[in-house]
Image (cartoon, helix red, strand yellow):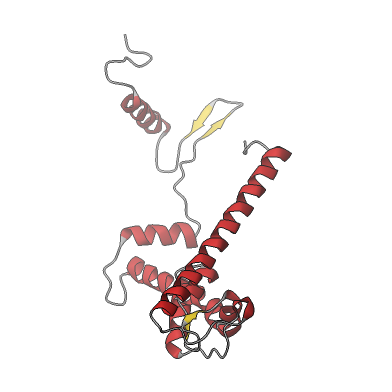
Amino acid sequence: MGRPRMTDEEREAKRLAKNARQRERRAHVKRAKEDARRKLAREGVLKSEPAVGGAATGFEPTLEDRARVQSLAGLGMRHDEIAIMVVNPATNAPVDEKTLRRHFEPELREGPVKANSKVAESLYQQATGTGGVARSTTAGIFWAKSRMGWRETQHVEVDVKSGVLIAPAGMSPEDWVRAAHEANADKTEPGKKSEGEG
């Protein structure tokens, strides 16, 4: 059974709530940029006002800017958050999202891919015990489940027509019934008798 279907009213309420959260986030970022600009103006560092619409004029990204943007994109930060961390030397104010996307398109695209590849490589080294990293059983199990499709399942079959129990591989039906009974006995509350006890 899946989740119950949402009514039109619930769907509309969910959409409105999402839009409100997005407006709030944009307003928060705009306030943070304005606060940063005012602070720099008070300190006498701000050289000139940003151009109309917030577009940064004469911005040339440095190698340090590129590395920072790629790293932050790899950490999963949103573009509006990353833009706050990049300062235009011409205005000494944070750049806007359009400027960020225009000047850092490769870094924004490659950052998450590089971060994921580093994590995958580290996980692989932990799972296999290579590269000077100690072997980790947990990493091996995670790798097997997520990459190889392994699962922790127990198959129990009952032939409905004959009523014959087909136990998991490596267990006799008697062993399986005994193990299932012991597991159920462990689950009963203390002081309560399970079925069949007198």
Q: Is residue 170 above or below residue 122?
A: above
Q: Can residue 73 be seen in this view?
A: no
Viewport quadrant of the C terminus: top left
Q: Is residue 196 something one can see in this rendering?
A: yes
Q: Residue at x 61, y 48 (%)?
A: 17
Depth check: give the residue in front, 107 or 174: 107
Residue farthest top in this picture: 198
Q: Which residue is drawn at 56% across and 76% down?
A: 96
- Residue 112 position within the rendered picture, expressed as x and y whole percent measured from the top left: 50, 73
Find residue 54 and report its horizontal and vertical position in percent. 59, 77
Residue 114 in the figure: left or right of residue 19: left
Name the residue rendered at 31%, 27% in the picture: 186
* Quadrant including the N terminus: top right
Number of numbered tags placed on the structure image: 0
Percent position of residue 163, x then y? 55, 25
Q: 111 or 196: nearer the eye?
A: 111
Residue at point 30%, 70% (across, down): 129
From what the image shows, is residue 45 above or below residue 6?
A: below
Say above or below: 5 vs 77. above
Task: Identify the image quadrant of residue 173.
Answer: top left
Please indicate whether residue 93 sits to the left or right of residue 187 in the image. Answer: right
In the rendered image, the vertical position of residue 142 relative to residue 198, given as above or below:
below
| Residue 37, horizontal then vertical, whole percent | 47, 75
In this view of the protein, which residue sits in the foreground, 186 or 65?
65
Locate residue 192 relative to residue 99 in the image: left or right: left
